């Protein structure tokens, strides 16, 4: 794979949901994901953030192939998933795995943890029974659980431990990409940090690409190399995390950042913090969808839809005035990453090409 080619890509991706009203009235259409273009690069941690209902989970499910798009395309290493034959599709299902928000509801309560982690190996016909048992023990160890945990059932575990089981299960088939839909938001804050650390360690060890969906920007600041901000089914800003946090280019990102609850010294006051709920995605506002809540809106914003454009160095924003507005981010104290993330980011930013080679050689063997 070349450095230029993303590992995972969305092109004009759309997912509409049609909900039928009882008796009278036309069906309503929710444009949950409404024309999303994004490119996730091998080895990075790519975060997708936005308020509740903006389409994050729908986008994650589309990327992993859990639901089909109603328009557009998802590509893995340049190949359109929709065009694959069943065998190639099975292979890709091993390559892209999903971590659920609520590990309890995603784990069959009647199966032991060992059987749950082994299941993907069996499904994909990986290894003999003995090899699979060995793989389960290794995976438990990787996520900080003990071998004897294999004989227990999900209800015997705490929330954090169950999420570790969910991660071990996602790792079992030797994926290249892990997509986590709010993977730590159901956990206590102290446990969140442990699970984030595990994800970062596994990412380094296995050369994984992580796509993390979150509404909590505090988690994202620890982990992400790049961030995409979603609003009402569309991506409104995407760029390097450090830059987006320090100097957002879209008013919606500025408002999201203003809501981070941190004891910040020296943060400039933000023009207006985000108020009220987002508009109904069944009837999104005309023009720029954010104009009904944007403190910088001008008359043209209500009629002309801005497209994503480069505001410098590959940083993209969908605002007519992006680049002209002097928006406020959060200070260095908030943009500071965890040490592991900072090390990874530096490696990533300075040696992308070398890193792509490293990822290929680090790929875990299919037999594991
Ligand atoms: N199966 C479905 N049928 C109808 N509408 C749906 C369905 N799934 C999602 N939606 C709608 O699509 C929009 C996006 O939902 P989605 O769950 O992707 O948002 P989200 O950003 O993940 O929100 P949250 O942060 O609350 O998890 C919402 O308006 C939601 O009501
Ligand atoms: S295009 Fe207008 S309404 Fe939209 S974010 Fe920019 S200034 Fe605000
Ligand atoms: Mg969601």
Image (cartoon, grey):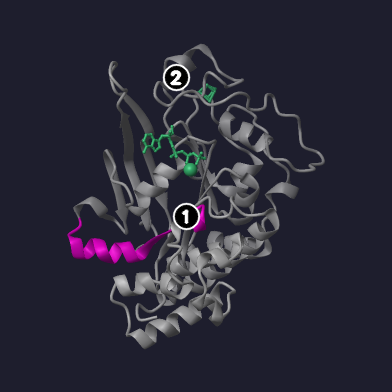
Q: Is mark 2 on a helix, strand or loop?
A: loop
Pick the front one: 342 or 105: 105
Looking at the image, which residue is at 68% across and 64% down?
339
Q: Position of residue 147 (x, y in %)?
A: 54, 81
In the picture, the disc for residue 285 is 2
For the point 30% across and 62% down, which residue is it?
92
Binning the other alpha carbons within 10 Å of mark 1 as few (below 14), some (14 to 19) or many (20 upward) gives few
* Region in magenta: 84-104
Q: Mark 1 or mark 2: which is in front?
A: 1
Tag on residue 242? Answer: none
* Closest to the observer, 280 or 348: 280
Q: Quadrant of residue 12?
A: top left
Q: Mark 1 points at which residue?
A: 105
Secondary structure under the numbered disc 1 in the rendered image: helix
Q: Which residue lies most toward the right here?
A: 265
Q: Where is residue 219 in the image (x, y as percent from the top left)?
A: 62, 51
């Amino acid at each position: 794979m070349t450095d230029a080619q993303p590992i995972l890509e969305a092109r004009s991706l759309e997912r509409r949901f049609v909900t039928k009203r009882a008796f009278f009235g036309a069906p309503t259409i929710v444009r949950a994901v409404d024309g999303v273009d994004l490119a996730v690069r091998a080895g990075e941690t790519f975060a997708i953030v936005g308020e509740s209902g903006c389409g994050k989970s729908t986008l994650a499910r589309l990327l992993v192939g859990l639901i089909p798009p109603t328009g557009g395309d998802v590509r893995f290493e340049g190949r359109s998933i929709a065009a694959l034959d069943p065998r190639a599709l099975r292979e890709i299902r091993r390559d892209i795995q999903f971590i659920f928000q609520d590990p309890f509801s995603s784990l069959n309560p009647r199966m032991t943890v060992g059987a749950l982690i082994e299941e993907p190996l069996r499904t994909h016909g990986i290894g003999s029974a003995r090899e699979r048992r060995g793989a389960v023990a290794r995976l438990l160890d990787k996520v900080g659980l003990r071998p004897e945990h294999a004989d227990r059932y999900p209800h015997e575990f705490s929330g954090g431990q169950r999420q570790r089981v969910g991660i071990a299960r996602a790792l079992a088939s030797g994926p290249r990409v892990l997509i986590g839909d709010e993977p730590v938001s159901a956990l206590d804050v102290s446990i969140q940090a442990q699970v984030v650390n595990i994800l970062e360690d596994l990412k380094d060890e296995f050369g994984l690409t992580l796509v993390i969906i979150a509404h909590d920007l505090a988690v994202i600041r620890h982990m992400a190399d790049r961030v995409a901000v979603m609003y009402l089914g569309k991506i409104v800003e995407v760029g390097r995390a450090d830059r987006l946090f320090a100097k957002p280019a879209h008013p919606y990102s500025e408002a999201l950042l203003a809501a981070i609850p941190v004891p910040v010294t020296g943060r400039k006051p933000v023009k207006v913090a985000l108020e009220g709920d987002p508009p109904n995605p069944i009837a999104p506002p005309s023009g720029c969808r954010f104009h009904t809540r944007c403190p910088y809106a001008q008359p043209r914003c209500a009629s002309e839809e801005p497209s994503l454009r480069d505001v410098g160095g590959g940083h993209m924003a969908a605002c007519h005035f992006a680049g002209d507005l002097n928006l406020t981010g959060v200070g260095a104290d908030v943009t500071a990453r965890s040490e592991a993330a900072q090390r990874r980011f530096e490696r990533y930013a300075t040696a992308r090409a070398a890193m792509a080679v490293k990822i290929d050689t680090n790929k875990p063997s299919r037999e594991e």
